[in-house]
């Protein structure tokens, strides 16, 4: 643990940012899984779930949680399953 006041603040700020990033990434992964599962089971709301997954993938790419090429690859996988 740091001794300098600004370094202590930085640790807490970094931890909050890390928690938010992990949460957003987990949200994205869950949306992808539910969209793929809905497509497999031919659910009624599969198009809504695909749109939600694509939206979360774009948001993660915009905030640099994932690389833009990976985002494109994931979107392609989700839409191809459709």
Image: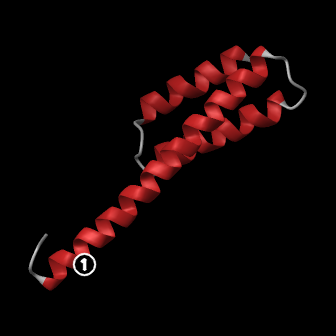
Point out residue 41 in the picture as x, y percentages from the top left corner. Answer: 81, 17
Vertically, is 25 above or below 82? below
Residue at coordinates 41% horizontally, 57% vertically from top-left? 19
Q: From the top left corner, tell me how far across and down residue 31 is, in percent.
A: 65, 37
Is residue 74 depicted above or below 23 in this figure?
above
Residue on which the image places disc 1 = 9
Residue 27 lies left or right of residue 51; in this view the side is left
- Mark 1, other Cα within 10 Å: few <14 / some 14–19 / many ≥20: few
In this view, the residue in front, 54 or 30, is 30
Along the horizontal axis of the image, is 15 left or right of 24? left
Residue, x 32% and y 71% (percent of image)? 13
Taking 38 as reference, is 67 above or below it?
Answer: below
**Is residue 12 positioned above or below 38 on the image?**
below
* SS state under label 1: helix
Residue at position x 33%, y 63% in the image: 15
In the image, farthest residue toward the right: 44
Q: How many discs appear?
A: 1
Q: In this orientation, which residue lies closer to the viewer: 55 or 45?
A: 45
Q: x, y percentage for residue 63?
A: 45, 52
Res 75 → quadrant: top right
Which quadrant, please, contains the C terminus? top right
77 sits left or right of 9 in the view? right
Image quarter where the N terminus lies is bottom left
Applied colour scheme: secondary structure
Q: Residue furthest front?
A: 1
* 70 horizontally vs 76: left or right: left
Residue 25 in picture, x, y percent from top left:
49, 44
Farthest residue to the left: give it.
Answer: 3
């Amino acid at each position: 643990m740091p001794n300098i006041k600004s370094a202590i603040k930085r640790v807490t700020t970094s931890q909050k940012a890390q928690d938010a990033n992990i949460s957003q990434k987990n949200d994205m992964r869950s949306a992808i899984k539910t969209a793929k599962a809905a497509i497999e089971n031919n659910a009624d709301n599969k198009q809504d779930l695909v749109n939600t997954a694509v939206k979360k993938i774009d948001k993660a790419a915009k905030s640099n949680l994932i690389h833009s090429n990976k985002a494109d690859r994931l979107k392609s996988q989700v839409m191809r399953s459709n």
